[in-house]
Image: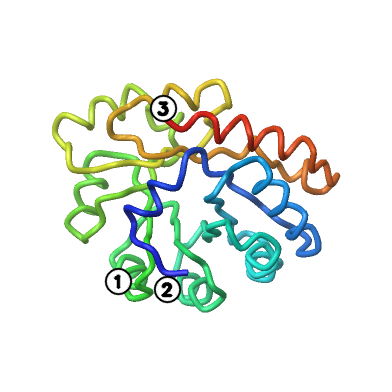
Amino acid sequence: MTLSTHALLSAASVIPVLTVEDANTAAPLARALAAGGLRVVELTLRTAAALDALKAMQDAAPELIVGMGTIRSAKDAKDSANAGAAFLVSPGLTAPLAAALQETGLPSLPGVASASEAMAAREAGFAALKFFPAEPAGGIDYLKALHGPLPDLVFCPTGSISQARAPDYLALPNVACVGGSWIATPAHIAAGDWKLVTANARAASAMKS
């Protein structure tokens, strides 16, 4: 699936940030998230199962836009793109990583945590950014402060954002979507609690402003 960054952000609301340890859980996880009305999900490249889980999720729920997060190197970007990731997310940004993300041709949300990092990412060609770690880095007040001097940037804040706080982030003019791990935690996934995952996904999809 090839899509623009604008189309990605338009489809997203709360993006579940998923850590899958066992690729066999990926298919029921994908179906549970899709049943809750979510369209965009992010796997994390933190486990050996991640790339296999990506394909399994896409096969099980083709309507989902499945991206890969925790992209830290050019190899991570290339491997994820080759595995079929629809978009890429990184916790931070270096010059080599910026070049690798752009080389894939996929929508990418590089991570920033300060005004200087956001400006550097913009100069590198990225106008949509991951604000990470959102709550420790200043949260809603910091994003409000960034909007005045950097009005052309939009953010997907991620990191310690609770279900209760997500709507406040989504109400900000420079926030396009929010990353949240509460929708399907590793414990939910390991337990196969798909009804709870669907309920959490439904609540998250209803937050779209």
Measure how far apart labels 3 and 1 are at the Cα level: 29 Å
Q: Earlier in the sequence, mark 3 or mark 2?
A: 2
Residue with the mark numbered 1? 99
Q: Nearer the viewer, residue 30 or 21?
A: 30
Of the two numbered discs 3 and 2 in the rendering, the one whose residue sits closer to the viewer = 3
Residue assigned mark 3: 169
**Residue 35 occupies which quadrant of the picture?**
top right
Horizontal and vertical percent position of residue 98? 31, 65
Residue at far left of view? 149
Q: Quadrant of the C terminus?
A: top left
Q: Which residue sits at x=40%, y=53%?
A: 8
Secondary structure state at the residue bearing disc 2: helix
Q: Residue at x 34, y 41 (%)?
A: 155
Q: Tell me: 89 left or right of 49.
A: left
- Assign a secondary structure to mark 3: helix
| Residue at image mark 2 | 74
Type of the residue with mark 1: Ala
Residue 157 in the image: state x and y as whole percent. Answer: 42, 38
Q: Is residue 191 above or below residue 92?
A: above
